[in-house]
Amino acid sequence: MKNLLLLGIAGILSACAATGLRYSEHPASSTPVPALAARLTVYRVNDSLLYFARSARLKLDGSDAGMLAAGRFKTFEVPPGTHTLTVDMWDAPGRWELPIEVQAGIARFYKVAPRSASFVAGTPGVLLMNDTPAGTVTGVATMLGGMALESTGKQHGGAFSLVRVEQSLAAPELMELRESK
């Protein structure tokens, strides 16, 4: 319990030391999309305690595209056509895959959010954990097993979801977020 408290405090303090440009200062917020590319902005607001101290791992077309903490955004310029955005948590079962089709000269916005279904599926394992090695192993195995069962065979599973958001709704949420490096 003490370690969990220390982890939570460390997460809060690291969020206070946020670096990176605010979206309102970032070139993507004010420059036109290049004529031969599409601009994808993926963001995560800081409005939930669920996985607040954990980063979401992003992939674009199967390649690592970085990590996204709560209160952060990432912007990518991609060629027009079909792409796949994927979000997961490196140490949790399941992932959310979103195939997208983009045209040249457009901007699209995608919001990452924690999935309560994944968390709830792992909760019985957390309840089994105790201060013994056997209790920890049993709890972790049960937690991961529950999360894996919840996400098995799904294109939309894992700890985080990823959904397209219209620019008019994304813009107000993005303005105070900071760029993820």
Image (cartoon, grey):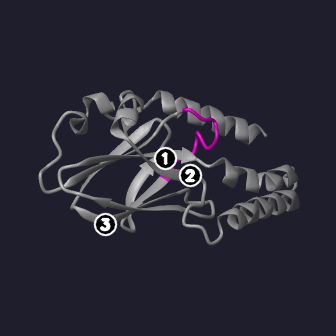
Graded by Cα atoms within 10 Å as few (under 14), some (14 to 19) or many (20 or more), the crowding at tag 1 reads many
Observer able to see residue 113:
yes
Task: Report the disc number at residue 112.
Answer: 1
Q: Position of residue 126 (x, y in %)?
A: 80, 51
Which residue is painted at 52% across and 48% down in the image? 55
Q: Is residue 180 visible?
A: no
Residue position for label 3: 82
Q: In the orientation shown, which residue stands out farthest toward the bottom? A: 153
Along the horizontal axis of the image, is 1 left or right of 58?
right
Q: Amino acid at mark 1?
A: Val
Q: 20 or 100, which lies in front?
A: 100
Check disc 2 and report the residue beneath it: 160
Q: Residues within 10 Å of mark 3 (few under 14, many from 20)?
A: few
> Quick check: is 50 in the magenta stretch?
yes
Tag 3–tag 1 contact (CB < 8 Å): no
Q: Is residue 93 magenta?
A: no
Task: Give the amino acid type for the residue marked by disc 2 in the picture.
Answer: Phe
> Going from the N terminus, do you reach mark 1 or mark 2 first?
1
Residue under the image location 70 percent in, 61 percent down: 147
Where, quadrant-wise, is the N terminus in this rendering? Answer: top right
Distance CA(mark 1)–CA(mark 2): 6 Å
The quadrant of the rendering that contains the C terminus is top left
